[in-house]
Image (cartoon, coloured by chain):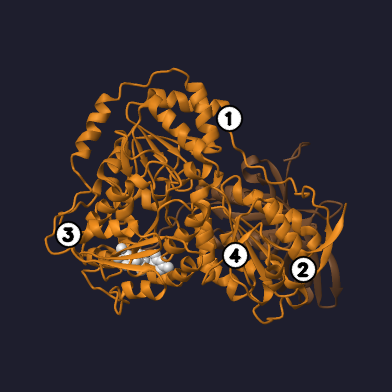
Amino acid sequence: MSEERSGANILVESLVKQGVEFVFGYPGGAVLPIYDALFGEERIRHILVRHEAGAAHAAEGYARSTGKPGVVLVTSGPGATNAVTGIADAFLDSIPLVVITGQVPTALIGSDAFQEADTVGISRHCTKHNYLVKDPADLAAIVDEAFQIATTGRPGPVLIDIPKDVQIAMAAWHGGPAQRRQRYAPRTQGAIEEIEDAVAMIAAAKAPVFYTGGGVINSGPRATALLRELQAKTGAPVTSTLMGLGAFPADSTDWLGMLGMHGTYEANMTMNQSDLIICVGARFDDRVTGRLDAFAPNSKKIHIDIDRSSINKTVPVDLPIIGDCAEVLQQILDVWGDRKPQDLTAWKDRIDTWRQKKSLSFPDNRDAIMPQLAIQRLFALTKPKDPIISTEVGQHQMWAAQHFHFFSPNKWLTSGGLGTMGYGLPAAIGAQLGNPDSLVIDIAGDASIQMNIQELGTATQYRLPVKIFILNNEWMGMVRQWQELTYESRYSNSYSDSLPDFVKLAEAYGWKGIRITRESELDDGIQAMMDYPGPVIVDCCVHNEANCFPMIPSGASHTEMILYGDSVAGTMDDEAKALV
Amino acid sequence: MMHIKHEAEERHVLTVTVDNEAGILAKIAGLFTARGYNIDSLTVADITENHSVSRITIVTHGPPSQIDQIHAQLERLVPVHKVVDLTERGPFVQRELALIKVAGMGEKRVEALRIAGVFRAKPVDTSTSSFIFELTGAPDKIDTFVAIMRELGLVEVGRTGVVGMIRGAGEA
Ligand SMILES: Cc1ncc(C[n+]2csc(CCOP(=O)(O)OP(=O)(O)O)c2C)c(N)n1
């Protein structure tokens, strides 16, 4: 039975059909018909953020922590442009989002109408796909395809721009399955010869290493389980990118820690000296490889990735396998059977000598809390609760990646690709909504937290008990560190001047505020944060000038890591400075 | 001191079959600019009866690794059905159409007409002091013709850019 419904109504029904629980949004003129359709709607909960970037990041946090797509609803013009940072963030980190933007009425498009922006044009290169809907009759199929595109293949954000007249106009609605176009069908399995080659290479390797990334998390819990299974059969040690933390348990004796610019000495040396790198769902990003011509010079490389454009993009590989991580790992396990790997004792002994460097160690300090210590205590005290951690961007993010440890996927939410300050608080809000019983903590810096500080109000409104743990060093620490190491300590505009009183700020929003200034207060402060049933900001005042080590300076190779205690202040040549 | 380095480059002709939907050309052209790839020429027209599919021919140049990336990045776009690197797949035919306006009197005019005959360029407009020649061929043939006309009173050149197709009976 076919009846007529408005575009707005068809949109809402289509979202319900997709199983959408939450829409993160902010109203405005060009989406009023959709907001009206949401009025009194009990099947979908609208979460009113305080800024559209917050909506997109909250949807990312929800998606990353639940494995389901996040949905965003914003108005035309400034609503859409404000959301762009979050969309670009989701694009680089392959997070499934469906973003619905209002647009001025079709007849006014192109006339510089009030609150008109070329949203489809602006978002073209930071979405996986986008649409401008011209007829409400197309909406159901477009929404259906948008969810398929966002969640399958390499996940990513998809944007649907809906002019106001299309939201109001009527079209037939039959309630049955949408007539989606059958054009998007990513390849998920490797060819059998590729799988056999991979098995032969792994079985022959004397110094193999798994290099895993966000793709394992995106592929879902099955990929994580299969990775662990294959690792157990092959015995190869495992390192991970920032985005992949949690896929492999950090308490395994074969865990090397994170690799790359701020990775562990053992992870980077293992990569450098390996004879085989098995890359699973990672993309040889510049933060990981360091100097390209010195990256793992003697190793063969297998690269498993769902996105063919990730293959040979920066590092040429010997055996590319295009497919979904879980599918391909299963294929490899099937062919592996009960084969035995090479004796890896000598290889692991070498790795142990690298571990002896204790590259994550840091000096004691009597007068100030070392930020690394604060993270270690936060980890130790919250571990029984198996928390979800989000971060902002900077030193605190890297310290969290180094000193907080993860045992399962979807517990670690961070902006890796775009490196967006202001991601952590809204992401924590989204994660808390998706995981109401979890302890969710945003590990923040004093500068980053101010970038989406307005979202404190969102948590208050929805009574979300999120915690913010600020490592307050009164600097944009990561910028200060680079200026110290590469610009002879000329600290140009990196001091966090005029910081607010974070405790009072918390209280102003109805949060609890806790300040920690001494090491002796650390554990009690963290405990008080956990014991409080509502949202808390902990202003943890840490050593102002601590640096994040180990570090591969830009333009250097994995073997040229700087550890704590190496004297490094100075400058760099222009070639190195020009690298990001 | 730092200087920008350049790698050895190759010219490739790619054909891209796409859904004929709003913004697709901007998507493809924008992909090239956003990722720093080169477009030497780009032609597009729909090729199915119901106008739902278009075929784009792109001529590009770059280092081999970049050409491979271009291929992969194009395939990643949802409305793209198929990408064929004709240069890689080879051998293939490539043709371009040009209109070339030449003005002059006397001997130069006679010579222009004679050379046009050699190149099988067809005069499609004639006045007492000018010709417009229509010439179809591979790009280098057109380059050569234009270079000669430059000495014989060349006024204006318009070129369509290349369309290409794999030789033989099969579909690419
Ligand atoms: C939106 C945005 N602007 C600028 C930057 C560049 N940036 C990277 S880290 C950083 C400093 C972060 O300072 P803070 O949040 O205090 O963290 P800390 O490094 O001190 O731990 C800046 C400015 C960024 N990553 N994102």
What chain does badge 1 belong to? A
Residue with the mark numbered 2: A166
The numbered disc on residue A191 is: 1
Callout 4: 10 Å neighbours few (<14), some, many (20+)?
many
Residue B13 visible, this orientation: no
Q: Amino acid at mark 2?
A: Val
The numbered disc on residue A520 is: 3
Picture quarter with the C terminus of chain A: bottom left
Q: Quadrant of residue A307?
A: top right
Q: Amino acid at mark 4?
A: Ser
Secondary structure type for disc 4:
helix
Q: Position of residue B69 (x, y in %)?
A: 54, 49
The numbered disc on residue A123 is: 4
Residue at position x 68%, y 62% in the image: A41
Q: Is A149 on the left or on the right of A137, as rendered? A: left
Callout 2: 10 Å neighbours few (<14), some, many (20+)?
many
Q: Position of residue B73 (x, y in %)?
A: 58, 51
Q: Amino acid at mark 3?
A: Ser
For the residues tagged 1 and 4, is the chain the same? yes
* Precedes in sequence: disc 1 or disc 2: 2
